[in-house]
Amino acid sequence: MKITGVICEYNPFHSGHALQLKKARELSGEDCALVCVMGGNFVQRGEPALVSKHVRAAMAAGGGADLVLELPVPWAVASAQRFAAGGVALLDGLGADCISFGAECPDPQRLRGLARLLLTPECDELVRAGLATGISYAAARERAAAKLAGEDALLLREPNNILAVEYLKAMERRGSAMTALPVERAFAGHDGESRGDWAGASHIRALAASGGEYARFMPPEAAELLRRELEAGRTPDPERLDAMMMLTLRTMTPEAYQRLPDAGEGLWTRLARFAATETTVKAVLDGVKTKRYAYARLRRMVLAALLGITAEAQTGEPPYLRVLALGERGREALREIKARTHLPLITKPAAAKLLPESAGAVFALEARAGDIYALTFQNPAERRGGAEWATSPAVL
């Protein structure tokens, strides 16, 4: 069985995602297994997901995925580079033959060529020179790419191309043998408005938050799952989350601030100073932000503080495979993966208790993140803890 992997968040799963999975299967062969590696209850933008990972995994399994595995939280809420590296490591670790991803540019050779240029010492030198002028990393990288790649540097202005290039960079670093299968993303912008019956996840989240009509942008089964979660109050309350983050920041020691991911260059001291006086996370981040630091980077630092994630926790590679949902071919895909992988495979939460110490520490962070996520729910009756140790994979 050929295994094609997809790294994703599905926040939430929508019709564009279903189309990408359909095209990935067409590119791979109808008898392939589509295995999704999905971020959990908190996502790479430094925010809680709209609905839980178990619900989103069930959406994906109902929308074309054969198997949904979890990208552990230290990598799920990291920079684009670490997020991509963690996902690629898991796909390589389970023995995937191909990786498919959405991109505004569907040409794998152009994307791979740009990825290779960004890995050269010449590019590193140009990026460092740009950073020395006070511009952001993204701006310095694009400026460096423009000198080395010409017009292809413009690809880095599109969000899905950026992640696609990061996947390919991670593959180059590892010497991965996976084949890249880009699927053109042409139906709606990543953060834009709707286009016909297509909309990106951010637009759907905005509709869900405002009571708008989101169902036409999602497969019916996924829309129904989202409706149930919204009605049950199992979605994050931004004010509760804000208060939890501010409590964490106000009570952290200087040593804890220094251990946060991406807290170098004196950034942690600015964060601590504004957290001591401001009243909301937005006010803190507005105070800390400069043109050098992207808002998403600062938001991830605050989220890492809340979840107890240190810079050390984001080193290395994800140490296990955890099943969140199985589709129609899921069991066959699991048998194939078991024959290929060297990583521990968790199909029931209790198996996490048998993990080696270092892997168990990662799962403990995941359990902590799950409990914190539940505490943000709109409905007080749904804020119970311990879900990580009690929720089995969804089987469709």
Image (spheres, helix red, strand yellow):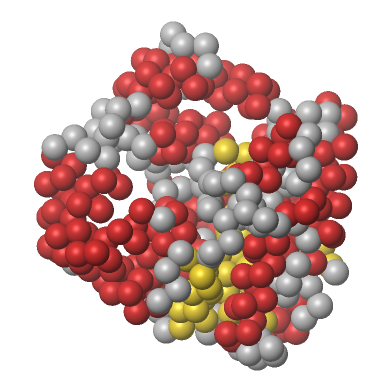
Q: Quadrant of the N terminus?
A: bottom right
Q: Quadrant of the C terminus?
A: bottom right
Residue at 20% over, 59% down: 146
Q: Nearer the viewer, residue 133 or 317?
A: 133
Question: Up-down: is 268 above or below 43?
Answer: above
Q: Position of residue 172 (x, y in %)?
A: 33, 74
Looking at this view, name the residue that lies furthest to the top. Answer: 277
Locate residue 336: give its quadrant.
bottom right
Question: Up-down: is 239 above or below 372?
Answer: above
Locate residue 195: give its quadrant.
bottom right
The answer to whether residue 351 is visible is no
Question: Up-down: is 69 above or below 337?
Answer: above
Residue at 55% over, 46% down: 192
Looking at this view, name the residue that lies furthest to the front. Answer: 196
Residue at 87% over, 37% down: 231
Question: Up-down: is 178 above or below 228?
Answer: below
Q: Position of residue 177 (x, y in %)?
A: 42, 84
| Left or right: 338 as drawn, with respect to 133 | right
- Total number of numbered labels? 0
Q: Position of residue 271 (x, y in %)?
A: 38, 23
The answer to whether residue 51 is visible is yes
| Left or right: 318 as drawn, with respect to 38 | left
Residue at 43% over, 24% down: 285
Q: Nearer the viewer, residue 136 or 203?
A: 203
